[in-house]
Image (cartoon, rainbow, N blue to C red):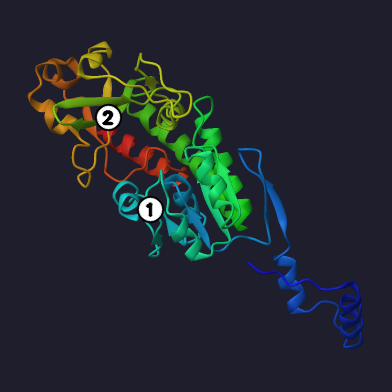
């Protein structure tokens, strides 16, 4: 993004001319005011200078892409566009961005060809990749997540991206709507007799003959939302320090309370992502679990990105409330 600089002498002359015409500020002056440069500090401590609100923005991770869309900014480039469309249909792309490669290894040549004003990355991307991208355009790196305060980190990321794109009013609205959604969801669940109900959310994958189950503990974004809804996380396993995710197998599910409500997300567009309705159907441990026998297993709708922003979490809240009220 180019910015025109005016010398002091030229600015003075322009002011005199406008004064003579009885005008104190022109449309051009207003435009230049809107394009004033500013500097942001990202989650790596880097100072990122922008010549005005970024318009052509590339996103290397799906959560930052979702934030852009929610803020009304159409991303110019997105990592793994097909994957985003599969896993985050709750906040769909409204344009046709250029696919810049995988989330772990975006193509530097492709990004450079887009001539972006800004590249949004997360701390999941290697420092070497971020260093390379800084040679192409300013890079704003947000923390991928934070198990100590996942909702707080989600909002912090949204606010930083909003400042970079000049959409702070929309960010404030998104956060306000999310808080209202949580409050309404909690009230509805309490009315349905689920206040304090034991709840466990997971996803899983089948690779060959191996079934892996990933618990979303208290430190996960989903876990934090569940707590705000008045649900009690029933996982006993510990999650990692970034995403609050644990690891277990079908035997580990025997440690869940017999009265737990068990929910999961799979995806019809991602083969092997739904062992609960597939490989485990014939597993004797799974079929003998009390909550399975009672029918307290709930598949939530596809396309809610579990690591997304306020709009994905709004959709998640709606799906949990609808499921538990049945």
Residue drawn at x 56%, y 63% as measured from the top left: 55
SS of the residue under disc 1: loop
The structure residue drawn at horizontal position 54% and vertical position 54%, both measured from the top left corner, is 119
Residue 23: image quadrant is bottom right
- Mark 2 and mark 1 lie on one chain; the one further toward the N terminus is 1
Residue 263 marker:
2
Observer-nearest of 190 and 158: 158
Label 2, secondary structure: give it: strand
**Residue at the spot of label 1:** 101
| Residue 47, horizontal then vertical, whole percent | 69, 46
Answer whether residue 304 is visible to the viewer in this image: yes
Place of residue 193 in the rendered image (x, y in percent of width and height, measured from the top left): 33, 24
Q: Is residue 34 above or below residue 61?
A: below
Between circles 2 and 1, the one closer to the viewer is 1
Q: Nearer the viewer, residue 204 or 19?
A: 204
Q: Residue furthest bottom?
A: 21
Q: Is residue 110 left or right of residue 148?
A: left
């Amino acid at each position: 993004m180019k910015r025109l600089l005016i010398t002091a002498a030229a600015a003075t002359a322009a002011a005199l001319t406008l004064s003579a015409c009885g005008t104190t500020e022109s449309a051009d002056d207003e435009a230049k005011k809107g394009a004033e440069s500013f500097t942001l500090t990202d989650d790596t401590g880097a100072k990122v200078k922008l010549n005005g609100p970024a318009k052509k923005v590339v996103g290397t991770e799906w959560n930052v892409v979702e934030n852009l869309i929610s803020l009304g900014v159409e991303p110019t480039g997105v990592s793994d566009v097909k994957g985003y469309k599969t896993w985050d249909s709750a906040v769909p792309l409204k344009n046709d961005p250029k696919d810049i490669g995988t989330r772990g290894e975006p193509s530097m040549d492709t990004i450079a060809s887009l001539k972006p004003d800004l590249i949004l990355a997360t701390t999941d991307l290697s420092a070497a990749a971020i260093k390379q991208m800084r040679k192409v355009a300013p890079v704003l790196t947000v923390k991928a997540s934070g198990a100590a305060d996942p909702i707080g980190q989600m909002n912090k990321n949204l606010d930083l991206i909003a400042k970079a794109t000049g959409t702070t009013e929309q960010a404030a609205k998104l956060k306000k709507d999310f808080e209202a959604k949580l409050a309404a969801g909690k009230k509805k669940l309490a009315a349905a007799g689920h206040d304090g109900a034991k709840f466990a959310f997971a996803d899983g994958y089948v690779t060959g003959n191996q079934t892996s189950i990933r618990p979303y503990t208290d430190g996960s974004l989903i876990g934090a939302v569940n707590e705000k809804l008045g649900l009690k996380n029933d996982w006993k396993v510990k999650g990692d320090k970034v995403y609050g995710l644990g690891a277990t197998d079908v035997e580990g599910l025997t440690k869940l309370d017999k009265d737990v409500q068990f929910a999961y997300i799979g995806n019809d567009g991602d083969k092997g992502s739904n062992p609960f309705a597939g490989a485990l159907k014939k597993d004797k441990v799974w079929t003998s679990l009390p909550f399975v026998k009672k029918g307290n297993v709930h598949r939530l709708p596809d396309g809610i990105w579990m690591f997304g922003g306020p709009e994905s979490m709004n959709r998640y809240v709606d799906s949990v409330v609808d499921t538990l009220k049945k």
